[in-house]
Amino acid sequence: MKEATAIPSAILPDALILVIFGGSGDLTKRKLMPSLYQLYRKGKMPSRFAIVGSGRSEYRDEDYQSYIAENLKKYLPDEEYDGSKAEEFVSHLRYYAMSPTDREEYPGFRQYLSIVDGEIENPGNYIFYLATPPELYGVIPQNLQTVDLNRGEAHGKETLRRIVIEKPFGTDLESALRLNNLYQGIFEEDQMFRMDHYLGKETAQNILALRFANGIFEPLWNRNYIERVEITAVENMGVEKRGGYYDHAGALRDMVQNHLSQLLALVAMEAPASFDAGSFRDEVVKVYRSMRKFSPEDIRKNVIRGQYVESHVGENTLKGYREEDKVDPESRTETFVALKVFLDNWRWEGVPFYIRTGKQMPTKVTEIVVHFKSAPHLIFGSSDGKAVPNTLTIRIAPNEGATLKFGMKVPGSGFEIKKVSMDFTYDKLGGVPTEDAYSRLLEDCMLGDPSLFTRSDAVEFSWRFYDPILKEWQKHNDEIPLYGYPARTWGPKESDRLLESGTSWTNPCRNLTDNDIYCEL
């Protein structure tokens, strides 16, 4: 497997064509085009470039440009939208209507790209972005190969050829291995950029800075001083218009196998020898390989799944998952999952990692909470008579930042200890905005730095851990409980049993009153 490393002084290619398959789709208009516009506004696009949207919908270039311009104004924050810059940006857009599954259309597509090459003096540098349904991930690369668009050379000269694949990369171990084998037969590893936008978030990357750029944390970052780690990513909405997709995916595939596993790796990994793609991604794979495999008994004990049901919040009635559009009325797809995971390595032996995600929760938040062990002997009193353990909370979204909680003396006589917070948020950096995740990753792809993209062996080892859970659920779907929880609550109470006695989940919105009515579906 050919591995790429970060470019020491990476520079953009002088010219480039970015092809977006699914160019008229939701991801393109809501995420990709606004992110590319932001790069253009900041002078981070090649001096000569074109963006070619492709799909089955019919557009003339000017109509496609107008369509994207309207959506830029809709989806960009007001402070980041500049009408004149947006007009300049969309002038670089083209559109080519074709069926991505029809191999016979690709010779014409290649000829069209050659015409655009001539317009912008591009030597044949192409990046292909698959903003398509996952079922096309295996079809499009094979069709590109039939007309040599996968090869990094043109007219006897080496050119840039890369492909970006959105998650999910496979739906289980078998399909992921099949996709890996297919791609490795068409592209080199350093041409493949498997997208996980969580790694593009500044606060996700800041986990590495917090750990490895500060001498005060790393000596404590192990089983001797850390009691447990919580990783939570929840949303305060249902499946919206994604019922058809979500009912075949579920929370484990949609969030845990990719996004939350990446966050686990950032928290648990060893320091890479240097921050290049090879060293960094090697350490990620080591974490995945150390995840203790679940036996069937472990799955029943350490994995809790749930599904939101109808509830009433104020005067509003929130529908249950089974009443959502395009969802099976008898569906047993999980919208909530909580796991207790252990890593079998020297640093983390015996430390539980609690992973939790869910739809229709009381708030939208992604955060990591590191619980340090209490002082070995309590010599001071506290308001509740208990020790005041330290916690470090890393907020990925919203209100990006970090909070360290520690004990301080309450003013007055005696020595009563109270927990206080030391907070950092990105808005305290003099108004420096957090970089858009897609912008960061698209820029890295153009620069040729795959550090924040998932490598093929990481995909494989992640699926090797989660696939047995999916298989056990499938095999014993009616036997393994699927717990109901009212919409806008913190999930099924049964998830509490994963935690050790005397501990509880860290719920960011303590001021909300949870509904105590739970049921088993």
Image: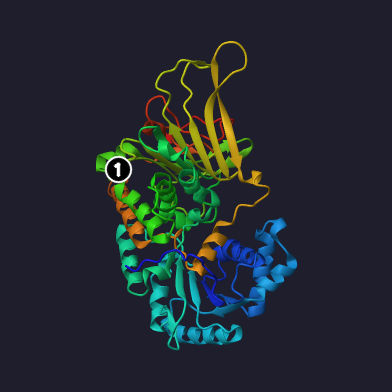
From the viewer's perspective, is 482 left or right of 207? Answer: left
Identify which amino acid the numbered label 1 is placed on: Asn
Residue annotated with mark 1? 345
Q: Is residue 439 visible?
A: yes
Placement of the N terminus among the 4 image quadrants: bottom left
Query: Residue 85 occupies which quadrant of the picture?
Result: bottom right
From the viewer's perspective, is 35 left or right of 284? Answer: right
> What color scheme is it?
rainbow
Could you tell me which residue is drawn at 37 percent across and 53 percent down? Answer: 284
Extreme-top residue of the structure: 413
Relative depth, front residue between 383 and 364: 383
Residue 277, above or below 373: below
Residue 173, above or below 428: below
Circle 1 packing at 10 Å, graded few (<14), some (14-19), many (20+), is: some
Could you tell me which residue is drawn at 58 percent across and 45 percent down? Answer: 400
Percent across and percent down for residue 88 are 70, 73
Q: Is residue 330 visible?
A: no
Percent across and percent down for residue 213 are 49, 46
Placement of the C terminus among the 4 image quadrants: top left
Percent across and percent down for residue 35 are 60, 63
Could you tell me which residue is drawn at 41 percent across and 46 percent down? Answer: 264
Residue 219, above or below 10: above
Q: How many marks?
A: 1
Relative depth, front residue between 239 and 212: 212
Could you tell me which residue is drawn at 32 percent across and 58 percent down? Answer: 460
Q: Secondary structure at mark 1?
A: loop
From the viewer's perspective, is 319 left or right of 283? Answer: right
Percent across and percent down for residue 379 are 46, 15
